[in-house]
Image: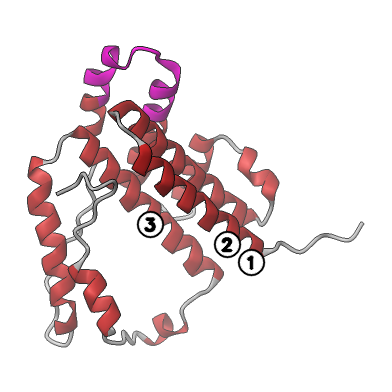
Amino acid sequence: MKETKFDFDAFDDKVYYYYLAFQGALQKTKDHKTESLIQTNFFQSVLKNAMECLLQSKAARKIPVKLIVTILENKGILSAQEAKDAMKICDIRDKLAHNIEFGTIEKELGEIIRTMHLGFRIVEPEEDESHLDSFIQAIRSIAKKSLTWDIYQRLDYVCYNLGVHINGEIYEIREPNPLVATGYEPPLTEKELQESRDLDYHSNNKIP
């Protein structure tokens, strides 16, 4: 039987549809439990997307999410710390899904969330990397504001940050950047600079 070639275009369309559905659902939430469940469910879909893309098979989505985290760590896509936080997100999702009374587990969830790394990578620019100034300042601004975030804002950011990281790594595997081999790093475009200025990420208008 001839093997069917994996349709990356259809895969990308599906991933984008999931993202739009996630954002739409998040905007409609009115309570912390629902919001957190949507965020953690979406993060698990990112894990499944990554495995489907790596193995180029829809059947890969059936692999248990914690096993996917281990595989991503073994392949160097997630660091040890990132893998620990990804496991915690999966634990939080299960606790939210399997407990009717949110109030009984809210304190426990808070204790887990406070141990999760926010993932700020603050680096000083080299002399020839002055175009990174705005990006670094934006990251520092987020880091400063994070000191006042509640547990839900922290969970929101960790889910977002890890999800973006995984997607970026998977895309790089699919479409390796030929500039990496030469060590050349082009300056940021005006659009990219504006995105850096707007990096004060928030979802559902809840992160200041």
**Magenta extent:** 91-109
Q: Is residue 19 above or below residue 70?
A: below
Q: Circle 3 — which element?
A: helix
Q: Which mark is on residue 12?
A: 2
Question: Identity of the amino acid at label 2?
Answer: Asp
Tag 3 residue: 164
Q: Is residue 12 visible?
A: yes
Magenta-drawn stretch contains 100: yes
Number of numbered tags placed on the structure image? 3
Quote the CA–CA distance across marks 2 and 3: 15 Å
Whether residue 116 is visible: no
- Crowding at dot 1, Cα within 10 Å, few <14 / some 14-19 / many 20+, comes out as few
Q: Quadrant of residue 191?
A: bottom left
Query: Seen in the image, is 168 located left or right of residue 133?
Result: right
Give the Cα distance between marks 2 and 1. 5 Å
What residue would you read off at disc 1? Answer: 9
Q: Amino acid at mark 1?
A: Asp
Q: Nearer the viewer, residue 11 or 203?
A: 203
Q: CA distance from mark 1 to mark 3?
A: 19 Å
Please name the predominant secondary structure of the magenta segment in the image. helix
- Image position, residue 72 (x, y; %): 48, 49
Is the residue 38 above or below the residue 57 in the image? above
Q: Secondary structure at mark 1?
A: helix
Camera-side mark, 2 or 3: 2
The location of residue 42, given as percent across then percent down, is 45, 42
